[in-house]
Amino acid sequence: MPEDTKLVHGFDLHQEVILDEVLEARRTVWIATANLKDMHVAKVRGYMPILERFDLMAAEGVRFRVIHSELPSRPFRDTLEDCGHLIGGGLELQICPRSHWKMAIVDGRFAYMGSANFTGAGLGVRKPQRRNLELGIVTRDPGWVGRLSTLFDEFWVGNYCADCGLRDRCPDPIVSP
């Protein structure tokens, strides 16, 4: 394993993926997940929905792309409705019923891949006895980050749509040229 790549689990996922990387993004955050929830993160006093934090980041120019397996939960959508910078172009969402991969790519320089969905239980935000048992790899290795970015981008532009057996269930299939 390259020296700038390591195995993470438990609360380390939250610390390394969310606090140390995603919330420090300067340009782009790409997330692929099968389950997406209205996760909360710490603020000066108490907690706030991560989408509100993403909205502040979008106001500073950070752009988000999310691949999700279905329409996000009602609480997630309710919070999103109040995030003007995200709904004004800061967040792009693609829904694909086949999406089951879990990854996050930040600014083209950091990547996470593993078992955790983008939820509090998945990324270790919840109390230890309520967290999922997850495992993943975080890397700053340019080769790994580049390969994961290419896979995400190939999906994003619809390379997997033409031969998909679930097109009849897809809410917005991509039509490739």
Image (cartoon, rainbow, N blue to C red):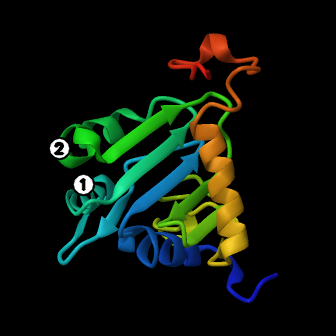
Quadrant location, the C terminus:
top right
The residue positioned 41% from the left and 35% from the top of the image is 73
Q: What residue did someone put label 2 on?
A: 84
Label 1 neighbour load within 10 Å: few <14, some 14-19, many 20+? many
Q: What residue did someone put label 1 on?
A: 55
First in residue order: circle 2 vs circle 1: 1
The residue positioned 64% from the left and 10% from the top of the image is 168
**Looking at the image, residue 160 lies above or below residue 142:** above
Residue 119 in sight from this viewpoint = no
Could you tell whether 128 is left or right of 86 in the image?
Answer: right
**Looking at the image, residue 105 lies above or below residue 140:** above
Q: Amino acid at mark 1?
A: Asp
Tell me the element at label 1.
helix
Quadrant location, the N terminus:
bottom right
Q: Which residue in the rendered view is the most extreme toward the front? A: 177
75 or 6: which is nearer to us?
Answer: 6
Q: Which residue in the rendered view is the most extreme toward the bottom? A: 3
**Looking at the image, residue 20 lies above or below residue 124:** below
Position of residue 78 measured from the top left corner of the image (x, y, whole percent): 26, 36
Q: Which residue in the rendered view is the most extreme toward the right? A: 1
| Cβ atoms under marks 2 and 1 closer than 8 Å | yes
Tell me the element at label 2.
helix
Position of residue 16 measured from the top left corner of the image (x, y, whole percent): 52, 77
Residue 166 found in image quarter: top right
Residue 20 in sight from this viewpoint = yes
27 or 10: which is nearer to us?
Answer: 27
Position of residue 165 measured from the top left corner of the image (x, y, whole percent): 76, 17
Label 2 neighbour load within 10 Å: few <14, some 14-19, many 20+? some
